[in-house]
């Protein structure tokens, strides 16, 4: 091999190595991602849950006391779903508010 070819080979290998490392890191992060359970997916597709999540987030952002209005839903199953969504929405926004990340 000539000196020019050796130099070009070294430069190309040094240019390609970072891409391989980056691809490896991305693959590792993708394999370590959070798993969504079937229960979470079913809840998030449920209208009472989404309604509660939204209203809980609004109350938390407004720094209101947690008072879910479960009377909005008639069926006990829907009320339970609304309450679960409200608690999750209120709970996710509150820590950000306390940390000072207010919009």
Image (spheres, rainbow, N blue to C red):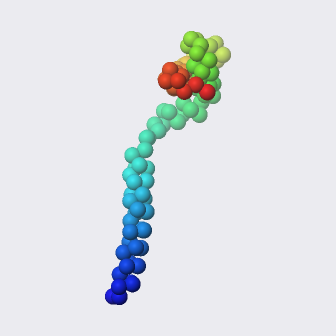
Q: Residue at x 58, y 15 (%)?
A: 63
Q: Residue at x 38, y 84 (%)?
A: 5
Percent coordinates x, y for residue 21 in the rendering: 38, 59
Give coordinates of residue 66: x percent, y percent. 56, 13
For the N terminus, which image quadrant? bottom left
Residue appearing at x 54%, y 30% in the figure? 43
> Measured along the vertical axis of the image, is residue 2 above or below residue 12?
below
Residue at 43 percent across and 63 percent down: it is 19
Q: Is residue 15 left or right of residue 47?
A: left
| Horizontal relation, residue 21 to residue 66: left or right | left
Q: How many numbered badges does the structure rendering display?
A: 0
Residue 57 vs residue 103, the one in the foreground: 103
Q: Quadrant of residue 78?
A: top right
Q: Where residue 99 sits: x, y (%)?
A: 49, 24
Q: Give the residue at the far bottom of this rendering.
A: 2
Residue 48, x across and y down, in percent: 61, 24
């Amino acid at each position: 091999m000539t000196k020019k070819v050796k130099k070009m080979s070294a430069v190309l290998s040094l240019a390609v190595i970072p891409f391989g490392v980056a691809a490896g890191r991305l693959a590792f992060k993708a394999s370590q991602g959070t798993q969504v359970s079937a229960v979470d997916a079913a809840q998030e597709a449920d209208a009472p849950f989404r309604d509660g999540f939204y209203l809980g987030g609004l109350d938390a952002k407004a720094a209101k006391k947690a008072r879910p209005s479960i009377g909005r839903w008639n069926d006990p199953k829907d009320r339970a779903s609304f309450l679960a969504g409200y608690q999750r929405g209120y709970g996710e926004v509150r820590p950000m508010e306390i940390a000072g990340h207010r919009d």
